């Protein structure tokens, strides 16, 4: 189940979802809502699937990327970025459509204030897209799959079924889209959520604790999951067990892509047979490097993850509520 031409020990991952241009506007001073804020504007290739693919590549994986783009300048730009990384590109181009885009407003500490996702084109990645012969072959040959919730729910369900027992991980993407994962949640090997996404997925109130969200996810059938909450403790779900893990303390340059990197690095560790909490620890270190190092990925990325995970505080395992 390896990509053609890859060495037998290279992990091959079929990645499906968003690959577009991320645009960011960062305030130079403390952000003031409903006011003009001085700052800087910049953009770069991104999207959950693309960000994850970059991390997978940096960890030595062979990547097949399936996305959607338009026939505009953004589409050409993301195609060039995919080619530069030497991913196998199965993306579909709709020449009469605009490429999806994400625009983030960041405060002076690089924390997200608001984001606007113009990503309707990804809704065209319907289940029949994944029945094309070359796509089916790539899925069959992959060692693992990684999807994001920009896909229609039917496609997520179909890919979870196609995984056939191989590892498949999913990224929640946003509170608005995470419920697309509901039908596949019992089939997912790992689920990666922010606190807001977990709240939406389990249909809880905004003030629900991460601990209670984890218990709700277990009731929904999640086998392994991660709930992040900015720089706070991360909740790790492994079967019926719930753990809390302190992430690395870093000064962020840009938080965009943190969860995507966490998902990719943890998936690699899972495929290598590590305990789930150790997979998450590796993912957290990779995520911390993503938001604090420029350019990313840094040289010796795998070594930095290994060394960083070794010095993280031990997780703690509180008893579950009755």
Image: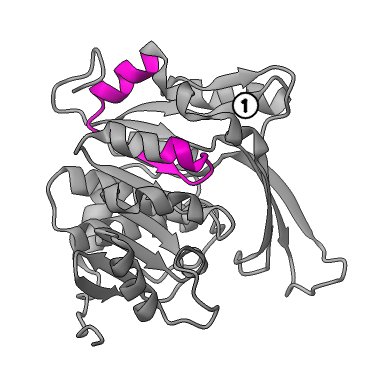
* Residue 268 image-quadrant placement: top left
**Badge 1: how crowded within 10 Å, few (<14), some, or many (20+)?**
many
Relative to 228, 318 lies left or right? left
Viewer-closest of 2 and 287? 2
Helix, strand or loop at label 1? It is: strand
Position of 164 relative to 208 (above/below): above
Magenta residue span = 134-156
Instruction: Judge whether residue 178 can be spotted in this image.
Output: yes
Identify which residue is drawn at 70% across, 19% down: 71
Q: Quadrant of the N terminus?
A: top left
Position of 49 relative to 239 (above/below): above
Q: Is residue 247 in the magenta section?
A: no
Identify which residue is drawn at 51% across, 66% down: 200
Relative to 263, 292 lies left or right? right
**Position of residue 143 measured from the top left corner of the image (x, y, whole percent):** 22, 31
Identify which residue is drawn at 21% across, 54% down: 306
**Position of residue 303 measured from the top left corner of the image (x, y, whole percent):** 24, 48
Q: Is residue 145 in the magenta section?
A: yes
* Residue 124 image-quadrant placement: top right
């Amino acid at each position: 189940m390896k990509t053609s031409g890859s060495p037998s020990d290279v992990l091959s991952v079929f990645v499906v979802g968003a690959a577009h241009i991320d645009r960011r506007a960062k305030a130079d001073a403390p952000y003031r809502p409903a006011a003009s804020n001085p700052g800087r504007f910049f953009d770069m290739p991104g999207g959950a699937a693309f960000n994850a693919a970059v991390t997978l590549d940096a960890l030595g994986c062979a990547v097949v990327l399936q996305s959607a783009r338009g026939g505009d300048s953004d589409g050409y730009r993301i195609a060039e970025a995919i080619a530069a990384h030497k991913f196998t590109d199965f993306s579909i181009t709709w020449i009469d459509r605009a490429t999806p885009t994400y625009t983030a407003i960041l405060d002076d500490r690089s924390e997200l204030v608001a984001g606007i996702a113009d990503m309707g084109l990804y809704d065209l990645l319907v289940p029949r897209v994944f029945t094309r012969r070359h796509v089916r072959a790539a899925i069959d040959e992959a060692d693992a799959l990684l999807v994001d919730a920009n896909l229609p729910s039917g496609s997520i369900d179909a890919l979870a079924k196609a995984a056939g027992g191989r590892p498949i991980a999913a990224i929640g993407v946003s509170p608005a889209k995470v419920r697309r994962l509901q039908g596949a949640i019992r089939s997912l090997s790992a689920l990666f959520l922010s606190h807001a996404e977990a709240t939406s997925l389990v249909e809880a109130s905004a003030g629900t604790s991460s601990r209670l969200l984890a218990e709700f996810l277990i009731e929904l059938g999640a086998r392994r999951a991660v709930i992040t909450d900015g720089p706070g403790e991360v909740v790790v779900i492994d079967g019926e067990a719930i753990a809390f893990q302190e992430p690395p303390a870093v000064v962020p340059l840009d938080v965009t892509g943190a969860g995507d990197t966490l998902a990719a690095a943890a998936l690699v560790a899972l495929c290598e047979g590590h305990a789930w909490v150790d997979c998450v620890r590796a993912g957290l270190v990779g995520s911390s490097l993503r938001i604090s190092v420029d350019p990313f990925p840094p040289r010796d990325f795998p070594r930095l993850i290994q060394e960083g995970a070794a010095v993280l505080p031990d997780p703690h395992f509180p008893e579950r509520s009755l």
